[in-house]
Image (spheres, grey):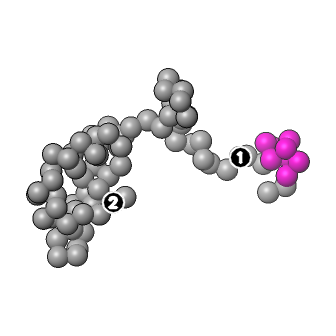
Amino acid sequence: MRTITSTEAKTRLNAILAEVERTGVSITITNHGRPVAVLTPTQPKPRVFGQLRGLAVPESFDDPLPPSELTAWGSSE
């Protein structure tokens, strides 16, 4: 998550809003070095797999494999 100052947020608000919408990544806004707000997209942007725009990647994609799958691949971890 990127952090910006309140001055930068005020100066570049439209560009920052466009960035949050385009990337789906939240931005923290600080005032005198203290985080005071987080600008978050209204709907999270779905993860895509490479160039396959129609294939959404589930949030559980990066979760560890269950023990039964690890055993099938010859691993005990």
Numbered badge on residue 24 = none
Task: Name the residue beneath numbered marker 1.
Answer: 65
Q: Nearer the viewer, residue 8 or 33?
A: 8
Left or right: residue 49 versus residue 11 is right
- Find residue 14 and report its horizontal and vertical position in percent: 15, 45
Q: Residue at x 20, y 66 (%)?
A: 5
Residue 14 higher or lower than 10, as above or below? above
Q: Is residue 38 visible?
A: yes
> Which-is-in-front pick, marks 1 and 2?
2
The answer to whether residue 36 shows anywhere in this view is no
Residue 71 is situated, as x and y percent measured from the top left of the image, at: 85, 46
Q: Residue at x 24, y 42 (%)?
A: 18
Left or right of 32? Residue 47 is right
Q: Amino acid at mark 2?
A: Arg
Residue 2's disc number: 2
| Residue 76 counted in the magenta span | no
Quadrant in the picture for the N terminus: bottom left
Q: Report the predominant secondary structure element of the magenta stretch.
A: helix
Q: Is residue 72 left or right of residue 35?
A: right
Disc with the residue nearer the chain's start (1 vs 2): 2
Q: Is residue 50 above or below residue 12?
A: above
Q: Quadrant of residue 4?
A: bottom left
Q: Does residue 24 appear to the left or right of 70 in the view shown?
A: left
Q: Amino acid at mark 1?
A: Leu
Write the start and end of the magenta stretch as one range: 68-75
Inter-mark Cα distance, 1 to 2: 30 Å
- Identity of the residue drawn at 35% across and 43% down: 24
